[in-house]
Image: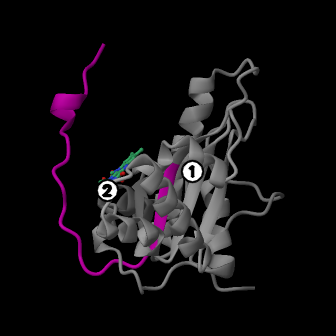
Amino acid sequence: MTNLPFQLPDINERLSPTPNGVISLANAISRRRSTPIKMMNPDGAGPEGAVLENILSAAMRVPDHRKLEPWRMIVIKGNARLKLGKELAERYLELHPDASDASLIEETNRLLRAPVCVTVVSSPDHAHKTPVWEQELSAGALCMNLLYAAHASGFAASWISEWWAFDPEIDRVLGLTENERIAGHIFLGTALGELAERPRPSAENKVSYF
Ligand SMILES: Cc1cc2nc3c(=O)[nH]c(=O)nc-3n(C[C@H](O)[C@H](O)[C@H](O)COP(=O)(O)O)c2cc1C
């Protein structure tokens, strides 16, 4: 069996309602943070093969009302990154006919900032009795799970949207249908160094009791 950073349970296993490894889970929740995309090493290692599949499989273990699986993922890695980057530059020029050469190069290289990008697509069933809002939240949970699964596998991760998450032409290039939207582009790779903490909200300001 491949030596993976963590193992997913077999379908036949009985799961304890109290997770094992509470301390490391608590550590992940309390100490994980995103790697700003500028802090990602463009030439660093990214998850591959069974490790990447393990991350993607773990990420799909999300609350999902009535088992609709209202999401999917598109992996962009290797040469596909430049292929999509060229599409981004082309679309950017269409939207900004006066775009500078520098900005077009930036678009072309957009995917090269990290070794792997997982684009999470929200695919809600609008005709279903489960509210679309619930289905969309499930896609957001999947994005968050991807961050944790990558973190637990020893990789840096960054959830970003940028303009290309909101462009109908790029949606078409990526093969999205009319009812689908991009929930996030999750870049996975290796950080260039340690990360500064960012200010966090306090329970005092954000929590009230009814
Ligand atoms: C839906 C969503 C979209 C985001 N899009 C961007 C983005 O386009 N560019 C960016 O720099 N950060 C973006 N962020 C912010 C970062 O992913 C992240 O929240 C921030 O860097 C701090 O994350 P941390 O609390 O995990 O450290 C986005 C966050 C969310 C939830």
Image spot of residue 39 (x, y percent): 28, 73
Instruction: Decide whether the magenta segment is chiefly helix, strand or loop.
Output: loop
Q: Is residue 209 magenta?
A: yes
Q: Give the amino acid at mark 2.
A: Ser
Q: Nearer the viewer, residue 157 or 110?
A: 110
Image spot of residue 123 (x, y percent): 67, 38
Image spot of residue 15 (x, y percent): 69, 54
Q: Is residue 7 visible?
A: no
- The label shown at residue 45 is none
Q: Nearer the viewer, residue 104 or 14?
A: 104
Label 1, residues with CA under 10 Å away: few <14, some 14-19, many ≥20: some
Q: Residue at x 70, y 23 (%)?
A: 126
- Which contiguous range is marked in magenta? 184-210
> Which quarter of the image is occupied by the C terminus?
top left
Q: Nearer the viewer, residue 133 or 172?
A: 172
* In front: label 2 or label 1: 1
> Which quarter of the image is occupied by the N terminus?
bottom right
Q: Residue at x 33, y 69 (%)?
A: 101
Looking at the image, is mark 2 or mark 1 earlier in the sequence? 2
Image spot of residue 35 (x, y percent): 33, 66
Q: Which residue is mark 2?
A: 30
Q: Is residue 152 visible?
A: yes
Q: Is residue 76 above or below residue 73?
A: below
- The label shown at residue 170 is 1
Where residue 8 sits, quadrant-wise, is bottom right
Q: Secondary structure at mark 2?
A: helix
Position of residue 168 in the picture relative to residue 94 (left or right): right
